[in-house]
Amino acid sequence: MKKIFFIILITPIFLNAQFMNPSIGAYAGIGEMKGNSPSLSVYSLNGYIGFYAWFSADIEFRTGFFYAQKIENLIPENRAGKFYPFIKGYYLSANISQFFNDTFFLEEGVGIIIINDRIYNDRASWDIGAKAHLAAGFRLKQNLRISGGIDFASTVTNTSASYLIYMVQTQYYF
């Protein structure tokens, strides 16, 4: 038991040595989702953790969670017995930021994604696919960025779930 505790205790030291310049970020946006269904208007929330690996100082890796639900969920009404379609999932992406000057930047990224398709209330399939991300923004301080852009994902298994989100993103570097 003491060995396990010691390993858990020193693991963050090794992770910190392998990952440089960690960051956290989030975005909110609106867009559309579909999966063997007509397109639905949605709002989306996303949170992620980013880091630069020891083998590349230019590529930021991000892992995160996203959630998108039909936008009618935000309208006040009687919700008894109602189902609002949603998708949620996890991703790992590689992102590159290109700075045009000290403050303005363009960010692009690609990655893999796994989506839980809950567009119909009797279906809960997990789909695997790819995602792409494009954003432009400003660095407000040395460690704070704000940007706007698009996030797109499409899967190739089961229900072929996909989404396209127009988003506003913020990211903080430690």
Image: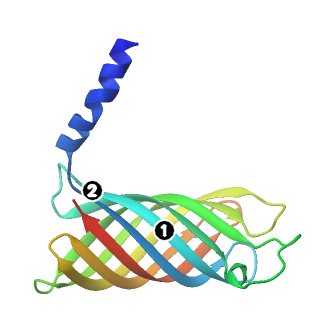
Of badges 2 and 1, the one in the foreground is 1
Quadrant of the image occupied by residue 162: bottom right
The residue type indicated by label 1 comes to: Asn
Q: Secondary structure at mark 1?
A: strand
Q: Which residue is depicted at the point 41% across and 69% down?
A: 26
Q: Which residue is mark 2?
A: 51
Q: Is residue 111 above or below residue 30?
A: above
Q: Residue furthest left?
A: 102
User: Answer yes or no: do the residues labelled 2 and 1 have beta carbons within 8 Å?
Assistant: no
N-terminal label among 2 and 1: 1
Residue at x 33% of width, y 82% of height: 147
| Left or right of residue 56, residue 145 in this image | right
Visible in this render: residue 160? Answer: no
What SS does tag 2 mark?
A: strand
Check disc 1 and report the residue beneath it: 46
Number of other residues with Cα within 10 Å of mark 1, as a class: few under 14, some 14 to 19, many 20 or more: some
User: On screen, 148 above or below 4?
Assistant: below
Give the camera-side residue of 173 and 100: 173
Quarter of the image containing the N terminus? Answer: top left
* Residue 33 picture location, percent across and down: 64, 78
| Residue 120 in view (yes/no) | yes
